[in-house]
Image: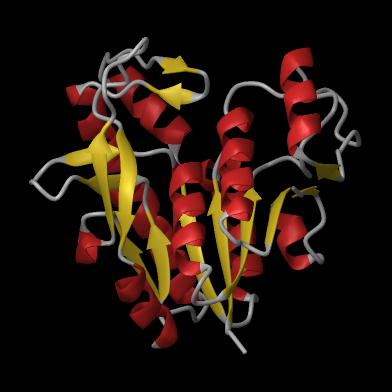
Amino acid sequence: MREHLIIIKVGGQIVEEEESLRKLLKDFSRIAGGKILVHGGGKSATALAEKLGIKTKIVDGRRITDAETLKIATMVYAGLVNKNIVAGLQALGNNAIGLSGADLDVIRAVKRPVGAIDYGFVGDINWVNAQALSELIDNGAVPVLAPITHDGKGSLLNTNADTIASELARSLCSRYELRLIFCFEKQGVLLNENDEKSVISEINPELFEELKASGAISGGMIPKLENGFNALKQGVSAVVITNAQGISGGLRGTRLVL
């Protein structure tokens, strides 16, 4: 029987605000067994960029990363946000280790080719070091992954955190009974963004296309669901979109199904 592993991707206001992050880490620390936390931090990166006079550009929920933006993303994601999370988990008795994709050669990526949109120094993942991550997890460590990868040739790349969580799940699901949780400030995917109670309990690919066409799902939620469906197709046992309370409350929220 395979061991259980849960991968939680956390982003949005949860990692930006001290109180919400503290609550999330308490809920996360109560999860028994193997676990990985993948985090974003886009609002903090945007705020620092504004202070430095660097304009942020986002297309279809994805950040355009020029050379200066990459520096900011690395400082914020792999530095401040990552180490705050690691310190918080250590204080709660979790033996957390903060990693970027370059550390232990955990995640390699290639720079996204220029097409209709030039995303700049954005990386598309082409390899996950499942063995290194498994060794950490099996020895009691809790990996905390920042959304910075590398190309194996000395260059760092900015990579969508939802994609990282999905690719980790796909790479590790043959070793573990794996659940993937996307955690943000809402209770789940909302049919009406102005109605907190309009949580859609279950979404399949057909409904996803309908919700996109109607505009009910847009922006960063689109790649989140695309990554979730891709993970299910590769053998991940469950994908749920919820908030911090949903983590400790029986995984309430929106469940993706094929």
Residue 146 horizontal side relative to residue 108, left or right: right
Residue 219 horizontal side relative to residue 42, left or right: right
Q: Judge by depth and name the residue closer to the eye, 14 or 191.
A: 191
Which residue is drawn at the image coordinates 35% and 18% (left, top)? 50
Which residue is drawn at the image coordinates 86% and 38% (left, top)? 199
Up/down of 160 relative to 142, above or below:
above
Up/down of 171 relative to 162, above or below:
below
Image quadrant where residue 238 sits: bottom right
In the rendered image, residue 135, in percent from the top left (x then y), is placed at 35, 82
Q: Judge by depth and name the residue closer to the eye, 26 or 221.
A: 221
In the rendered image, residue 98, in percent from the top left (x then y), is placed at 33, 63
Image quadrant where residue 251 sits: bottom right
In the picture as drawn, the residue positioned furthest to the left comes out as 154
Up/down of 13 relative to 248, above or below:
above
In the picture as drawn, the residue positioned furthest to the right comes out as 197
Which residue is drawn at the image coordinates 62% and 89% (left, top)? 1
In the rendered image, residue 69, in percent from the top left (x then y), is placed at 26, 25
